[in-house]
Amino acid sequence: MIDGYTVISLLLTLLAVVVILQGVKMVPQGYNWTVQRFGRYTRTLTPGLHLIIPFVDRIGHRQNMMEQVLDIPPQEVISEDNAQVITDAVCFYQLLDAVKASYEVNDLTRAMQNLVMTNIRAVLGSMELDEMLSNRDRINSSLLSKVDDATDPWGVKVTRVEIRDISPPSDLVDAMGRQMKAERDKRAVILDAEGERQAAIAVAEGAKAAQVLKAEGELEAARRQAEARERLAEAEANATEMVSRAIAEGDGRAINYFIAQKYVDALGKLAESDNNKVMMIPLEASSVIGSIAGVSEIARAAFEGGNPTVTTPRLGASA
């Protein structure tokens, strides 16, 4: 049978265990605990094993110091051009000061949620719908700056605020689709017109280059023809000078040169005529041959420096 002494011993042992358990605190990694003595903050317990005074000190708040995520519920926002959209967001934050987060604000999570929602309405409400849909990065940066400044007295560091979705009404989405289709059709027409313009310019430049090349070819041909005529005239002048000098020296064969030249030219034109099927050659053709032979002797004598003495054949002699 258990006597009174044994009961008292068991009670004292149980009380000692309770006191020890009340005085020994083990803070897990990633958390900070605040200690209050008679309801007043005294110190902060960091991760590890700590001792407090039982029944005098107690744990006030257990704060999570790791980065946390806060979902922002969907809400309706009216843009600057009176377009009504539904948007939601997500906020990432981290506690830097457990004391401020515990005693500077009541219900930190609810306070941050309402703060982010208010700033979303303020930022998006100052934008038109098109600007709102195309400037997500600028919206996120503006929200992050505003919310981080507002939560700094609470010992909170806001790392990111991201807009997850911006949903315009269905009729507005249809209107935007039609507008986008019209804009793309307009771009297609502009591109087609620009392509046709470039093609016309290319064709015109090609025709211009062809005309320039043709004109340059004709100019070069005319220049060459002029040079040929000049050389021919020079050759005839030299021949005339040679024949004149031969006549001056008393050589009668030189006269036959001109007669033979005219005779040959006349025969050539007669042969080139399309109307003549049969051509009659006069008997004086032998005289032409003799005249040509005489001219060759004149030329040979002129180049060799001699004085030819061959007798002059007469035109009209029989072959």
Image: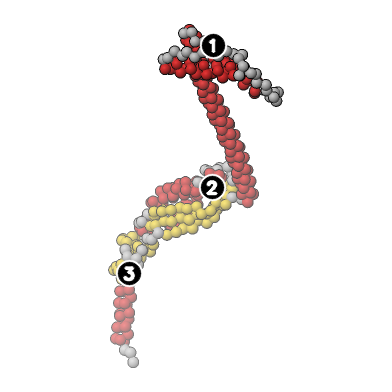
Q: As shown in the figure, which amino acid type bears the numbered disc 2?
A: Leu
**Which residue lies under the disc numbered 3?**
26
Q: Which residue is mark 1?
A: 255
Instruction: Return the residue at label 2.
Output: 133
Q: From the viewer's side, name the closer residue of 196 and 211.
A: 211
Residue beneath the point at 45% across and 46% down = 142
For mark 2, does the 10 Å Cα neighbourhood hold few (<14), some (14 to 19), or many (20 or more) residues? Answer: some
Give me the C-alpha separation between circle 1 and circle 2.
105 Å
Residue at 37% x, 60% y is: 65
**N-term mark: 1 or 2:** 2
- Image quadrant for the C terminus? top right
Q: Identify the amino acid type marked 1.
A: Ile
Q: For mark 2, give the secondary structure.
A: helix
Q: Residue at x 68, y 23 (%)?
A: 279
**Which of marks 3 and 1 precedes in the sequence?**
3
Type of amino acid under label 3: Met
Q: Does any portion of residue 234 appear in the rendered image?
A: no
Residue 210 position in % (x across, y down): 56, 30
